[in-house]
Image: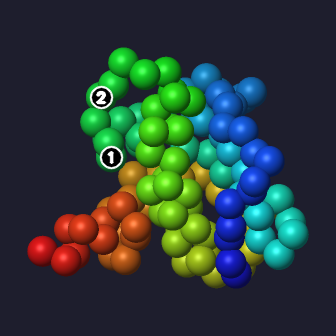
Amino acid sequence: MALEKHSDQQARISDADPNIVAFEMIEDGKVIHVEIPVDVMHAEFGATRLGPVEFFESHRDVIEGTAKQTYERLSEPAEHLRMTFEDFSAPGSRANASDELN
């Protein structure tokens, strides 16, 4: 399972919940819907005055890298992935990599 960036995707506020940023990634040509709650972003990256989408964009590389690693840990492919606090603290997560080097 290799999750990759979706070149045409735009991060946006979820239609279902204004406290979630939604975006898409690709696995073998199939669109995977990914969500990250705003409180998870704030816990990982700190508080900000930026709106949720702008805040996501300022940390996009780390969030997408962590989403990719989280997806690879799934026991089977899924069409939907909701990121959690645990995804950022998991051993080997992109967000946790600098802590593991120390």
In the orientation shown, which residue stands out farthest toward the right?
Answer: 29
- Circle 2 packing at 10 Å, graded few (<14), some (14-19), many (20+), is few
Q: Judging from the image, what secondary structure is the residue with disc 1 in?
A: helix
Q: Residue at x 87, y 69 (%)?
A: 29
> Is residue 84 rendered to the left or right of residue 99?
right
Marks 1/2: CA distance? 9 Å
Q: Are marks 1 and 2 in contact (CB under 8 Å)?
A: no
Identify the secondary structure beneath mark 2. Answer: loop
**Circle 1 residues within 10 Å: few <14, some 14–19, many ≥20:** some
Q: Looking at the picture, how far across and down is residue 82, in whole percent?
A: 60, 52
Picture quarter with the C terminus? bottom left
Q: How is the image coloured?
A: rainbow
Q: Quadrant of the N terminus?
A: bottom right
From this view, report whether residue 12 is shown above or below residue 1: above
Q: Amino acid at mark 1?
A: Glu
List the residue tagged with mark 2: 47
Farthest residue in the left direction? Answer: 102
- For the point 49% across and 21% down, the residue is 51
Give the amino acid at mark 2: Ala
1 w.r.t. 55: above or below: below
Label 1 sits on residue: 44
Task: Tell me which corner region of the image, top left, top right, bottom left or bottom right, holds residue 39.
Answer: top left
Looking at the image, which is closer to me, 69 or 85? 69
Seen from this angle, which residue lies furthest front? 7
Q: Is residue 88 visible?
A: yes
Q: Which mark is residue 97?
A: none
Q: Quadrant of residue 58?
A: top left
Residue at 30% across, 71% down: 97
Q: Is residue 33 visible?
A: no
Determine which quarter of the picture holds residue 23: top right
9 left or right of 73 in image: right
Residue in view at x 52 percent, y 72 percent:
69
